[in-house]
Amino acid sequence: MTKLKRMAINKWIAIFFLFNPAITLSQEIIDQTSSTIVEPFLISGKLADGETKLISELTLKPGDDQLEMELGFIKFLRSVERMAQTLYRFGPNESLAMGQIPFLRLPVPRNPDPDKVQLQDARAMIQQLIDDLDQAEAMLAKVESDKVKLPIKVMRIRLDINGDGQATDKEILGPVLNQYLGVRRSASDQVVELMDRSIHFDRSDVDWMRGYCCLLRAMGEVILAYDQTELWEVTAHRFFAKGQSKFKFLVEEQTDDNDFWIELRDVIAGIHNIQFPVKEAQRLKKAHRHLLDTISHSRIMWKRINAEVDDDQEWIPSPTQSNPFTDVRITRQMHSAWNKFLNEGEDLLEGKLLIPFWRGTNERRGVNLYKVFHEPQKFDLVLWIHGSGAAPFLEFGKCSDPDTWNEFQRIFRGNFFGFAVWFN
């Protein structure tokens, strides 16, 4: 598209917003020149309006890959926003227990008047996230063209975290992440550095986001596959300000100098009750499929990245492209190690490799992860640590070599998990 045509389109978009009372943007946002429909909505924090606008555009231009990419992107962010709003409404506590659950670690502000929360409410929240991600991934799956491009100042995206209809300066992604990262200074510096940088998401990043949709859905399905009732009854008040359980006396205790010992007792009771009967076994099969799809999307993503001949402000660069994070360099050795990790993970999920068992002396005894998903048993954390809980899934065969994982850590300079979160 020529610059002249783009300016003309932007002019008509601006006129549409000025005269359409159903969708409102600030004059500051309207005046911005954007080559996409979605970016002004993201920067203004009006994600719902952006979704409505893109759906409308797609009815006029069915099958438009650029619009499908933008709609998939905003649907993904809407799923995160909706999750944050629900968490805010529930009033999550800052507790040791809360910090161990990925979905509950979203940086939401304190709610002075939270709702009462039952276990079914928490499970419904996770189901809603799964449903939202289903829609986002389905839309992204429609994108076929290699010519799509989505430039966005990622760290200036606003999310209406508290659900009050206004995305304020305190709800800009950059500062929120900065606060969330806390003492992690190097990571915090990277957020500041990216505040005014536009990242150009391209076709490879469609697969990156599809992979994340699959990964998050897998995590959600695993949680919902098991019955956490007994854990909830003794720790609900630790997860949420008004978490409801049958033990009413647990919320009567006042915070004082002995609060550490009170919380310690709750933690011990919680660990004791991490005994989850299987509630919906089919969800574990879905989770297994999603995890394999995550690996597949990562492979496709890297194949596309390596085929790129440009160097246009990439989100995930190849070893020959520029990096959005100036103090991180992607090397060919890292790329090779990541491919090896994908193969290792796939073999583990399919039961071709076993997880080394931590009891006994036979080095060929291991846990078949495929059976964990397809022949599930009651999950008992203490017994798994003991080893007896893993007994139904033990068999003899080739086990994953611990030296392989140590090598991953070495190649990624001791931060393999951090790169894995980025690469997906």
Image (tube, grey):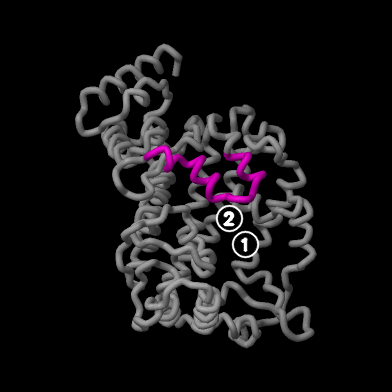
Tell me which residue sits at (60%, 34%) in the image: 193
Give, as a three-letter code, the residue at label 2: Ile
Disc 1 and disc 2 in contact, CB within 8 angstroms: yes
> Farthest residue toward the front?
257
The residue where tag 1 is placed is: 346
Mark 2 is surrounded, within 10 Å at the Cα level, by few (under 14), some (14 to 19) or many (20 or more) other residues, namely many
Is-magenta flag for residue 174? yes
Q: x, y (%) of residue 11? A: 33, 17
Q: x, y (%) of residue 275? A: 50, 83
Question: In what quadrant of the picture does the N terminus appear?
Answer: top left
The residue where tag 2 is placed is: 295
Out of 111 and 338, give the one closest to the viewer: 111
Give, as a three-letter code, the residue at label 1: Glu
Tell me which residue sits at (38%, 30%) in the image: 40
Element type where label 2 sits in the image: helix
Task: Count up the numbered dots.
Answer: 2
Mark 1 is surrounded, within 10 Å at the Cα level, by few (under 14), some (14 to 19) or many (20 or more) other residues, namely some
Q: Is residue 218 above or below residue 333?
A: below
Out of 168 and 317, give the one closest to the viewer: 168
Horizontal side, residue 362 vs residue 50: left or right? right
Q: Magenta region: which residues?
A: 168-191
Q: Is residue 133 above or below residue 94?
A: above
The answer to whether residue 59 shows anywhere in this view is yes
Q: x, y (%) of residue 83? A: 39, 55
Element type where label 1 sits in the image: helix
Out of 48 and 8, give the one closest to the viewer: 48
Tell me which residue sits at (45%, 14%) in the image: 3
